[in-house]
Image (cartoon, rainbow, N blue to C red):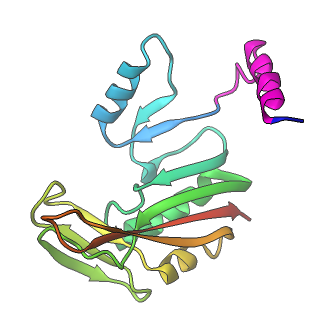
Amino acid sequence: MSTSTIGARWDDEYRHGRYQDEARLRGLDLSGEAIRQLIERRPGQSLPVAVADFRSYEGERPFAYLVAIQVFQHGHDDDAACYFTRAAAALRSGGLFFLRVNSSATQVYHRNTVLERNTFGGFTVRYDAGPKAGLPVHFYSRDELLARARDAFELVMEPRHEVIHRAPPQTGSWAQWEVIWRKT
């Protein structure tokens, strides 16, 4: 069956109310402004979004998947541990967990103070300058990601390391991990 035929069939399903009553996506952000702008871009729609911290999020039922892009790096080492515990609690058995976070291979550009290092090679800095001044940000090693997920998840996609070279006048590179797990 062709892609266009499959697409047309699903278009028809959605036109006839397929999944209409299901809450398929929930949005959560610490930034009230981010949520406000999202709602503003979708006038007249009732969006299942909230201003909240994932570390204390209590869902009504487990999710089939969780996407965390550049979220689990905010905070210290103990916050990193909490994020993984909360991700396991938020997902149903077999649920997928998509993660992108800062890598410990990042050459941190803005002035910062290293606050802590863990036994896996991850570290946390407090930015002393730049757009994140005053904020603690955690950088993960590959070993740390695997260790934090080991008890609740199995790998679907090995951690992929991406290095982005900064455009002048900035120097160095920023690196991040992308990985997919399935809750066991």
Between 90 and 177, the one nearer to me in the picture? 177
Residue 13: x, y in percent?
A: 80, 20
Q: Magenta stretch: residue 109 in it?
A: no
Magenta stretch, main secondary structure, is helix
Q: Position of residue 116 (x, y in %)?
A: 27, 81
- Give the residues in magenta: 3-23
Q: Quadrant of residue 35?
A: top left
> Is residue 7 found left or right of 127 in the rendered image?
right
Vertically, is 26 above or below 40?
below
- The residue lying at 39 percent from left, 28 percent from top is 38
Residue 81, relative to residue 118: is it above or below? Answer: above
* Rendering coords of residue 50 (x, y %): 43, 33
State which quadrant residue 31 falls in: top left
**Which quadrant: the C terminus?**
bottom right
Quarter of the picture holding the N terminus: top right
Instruction: Say which residue appears at 35% left-offset and 72% top-offset.
Output: 139
Where residue 72 appears, as percent x and y from the top left, is 42, 60
Which residue appears at 22% of the width and 77% of the height? 115
In which image quadrant can residue 103 be found?
bottom left
Question: Number of callouts in the render?
Answer: 0
Residue 3 in the figure: left or right of residue 96: right
Answer whether residue 6 is magenta in the image.
yes
In front of the other: 180 or 27: 180
> Front-most of 3 and 16?
3
Question: Along the line of sight, which residue is nearer the eye, 92 or 164?
Answer: 164
